Image (spheres, grey):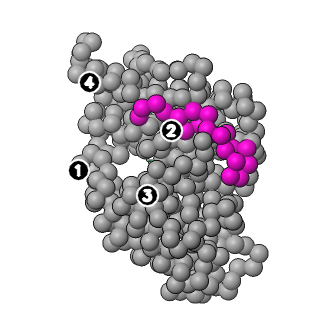
């Protein structure tokens, strides 16, 4: 293990480990803000043939690569075990078998190196991607209270963050998560897996379209629903209401509907709650039109991590662990919590 730098004074280095779904990731972050390394081994090529993540395949692959990924994260950071203040790991929510690999690896490494073990909630950590410095941008820390929009493959949550560890859930999806809808529509349109980036690419190729798909506003509530939209795409693909529109137009109309609902509802909630910033996070936050719509509509500063920190990564785990260090201390009996929650 390389140990080429003296301990960094004044900064707290945390190793973050993430294996909740189909990315095996590890990163070293200094004091929750400064990225020292970020190593991500994505498995999406293994799952593409099945059109979705196969849990057993995911766990096996995590097991095969996790130690190399951790070694690479330390080497890239130029850090040794003695430089670290803690090992943080995603404890949930996620796939049980996948989480088990990260949790047991982190537990073993922390114990062997005499470091504290911190158990991190994956969704809370997505928010903390917004605390990490982005190269080429002046560092700004989000002001609280903040409105968090967490849009991932498994979740769509609107959360009011009043302080570190102090959250109130305002709304959530009543059916499909936003990323899940992108993935299913990607499959319906024959664009492969994961659907999000593929649908975004395809939509870019669309000429201006008059095709308009439904929006579920669920007025009076901060909840979301995407299953009706997905069904509308299915009907269009089958040509049930006339000749099927070209695939790029369908992709563009679907994306426009999701972006419209997410951005307008998030901005309304931010205004109503007196939020001082808006935090976009989760895999779908990588979507260009969503980022642009929020930036254009929001009256308060919008924080969007660079795309590599939107999708699953170890850096957000380490960042969250820094700000919530004492609260997240875990014992050696830590088990994965596939349905872990971080706010009510
Ligand atoms: O946060 P994430 O990496 O994993 C979970 O915690 O679920 O999110 C993955 C999701 C997938 O559904 C993927 O299709 C979606 O994020 N996604 C996108 C884009 N990039 C990834 N959705 C829309 N546009 C994108 N550019
Ligand atoms: Zn995620």
- Point out which mark residue 20 bears: 3
* Residue 214 in which image quadrant: top left
> Which image quarter holds the C terminus?
top right
Q: Residue 91, position in %: x, y? A: 50, 60
- Which numbered circle lies on residue 237? 4
Q: Residue at x 68, y 52 (%)?
A: 165
Query: Exactly how many numbered labels are in the figure?
Result: 4
Task: Determine the secondary structure under disc 3.
Answer: loop
Q: Position of residue 233 (x, y in %)?
A: 33, 24
Residue 291 relative to residue 275: left or right? left
Q: From this view, report whether residue 118 is shown above or below residue 281.
A: below
Whole-angstrom CA distance, mark 3 to mark 1, is 20 Å
Q: Is residue 306 visible?
A: no
Pointer 4 local density, CA inside 10 Å: few below 14, some 14–19, many at least 20: some
Q: Tell me the element at label 1.
A: helix
Label 4 and label 3: CA atoms lie apart by 33 Å
User: Which mark sits nearer the N-terminus, 4 or 3?
Assistant: 3
Which residue corresponds to mark 2? 156
Region in magenta? 156-176
Nearer to me, 199 or 7: 7
Of circles 4 and 3, the one toward us is 3
């Amino acid at each position: 293990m390389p140990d080429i730098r003296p301990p960094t004074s004044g900064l707290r280095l945390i190793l973050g480990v993430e294996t909740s779904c189909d990315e095996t990731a590890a990163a070293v972050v200094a004091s929750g803000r400064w990225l020292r390394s970020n190593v991500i081994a994505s498995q999406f090529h293994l799952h593409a043939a099945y059109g979705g993540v196969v849990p057993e395949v995911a766990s096996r692959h995590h097991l095969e690569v996790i130690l190399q990924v951790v070694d690479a994260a330390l080497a890239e950071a130029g850090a040794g075990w003695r430089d670290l203040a803690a090992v943080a790991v995603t404890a949930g929510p996620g796939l049980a078998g996948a989480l088990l690999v990260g949790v047991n690896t982190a537990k073993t490494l922390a114990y062997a190196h005499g470091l504290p073990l911190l158990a991190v909630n994956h969704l809370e950590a997505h928010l903390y991607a917004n605390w990490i410095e982005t190269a080429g941008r002046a560092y700004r820390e989000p002001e609280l209270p903040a409105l968090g929009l967490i849009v991932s493959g498994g979740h769509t949550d609107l959360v009011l963050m009043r302080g570190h560890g102090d959250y109130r859930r305002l709304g959530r999806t009543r059916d499909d998560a936003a990323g899940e809808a992108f993935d299913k529509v990607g499959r319906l349109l024959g664009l492969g897996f994961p659907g999000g980036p593929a649908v975004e690419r395809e939509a870019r190729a669309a000429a201006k379209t008059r095709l308009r798909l439904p929006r579920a506003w669920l007025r009076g509530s901060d909840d979301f629903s995407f299953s009706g939209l997905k069904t509308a795409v299915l009907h269009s693909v089958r040509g049930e209401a006339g000749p099927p529109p070209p695939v790029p137009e369908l992709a563009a109309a679907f994306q426009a509907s999701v972006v419209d609902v997410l951005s307008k509802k998030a901005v309304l909630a931010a205004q109503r709650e007196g939020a001082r910033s808006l935090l976009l996070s989760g895999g779908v936050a990588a979507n260009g039109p969503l980022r642009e719509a929020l930036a254009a509509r929001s009256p308060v500063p919008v924080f969007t991590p660079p795309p590599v920190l939107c999708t699953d990564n170890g850096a957000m785990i380490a960042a969250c662990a820094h700000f919530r260090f004492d609260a997240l201390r875990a014992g050696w009996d830590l088990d994965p919590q596939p349905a872990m929650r971080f706010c009510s």
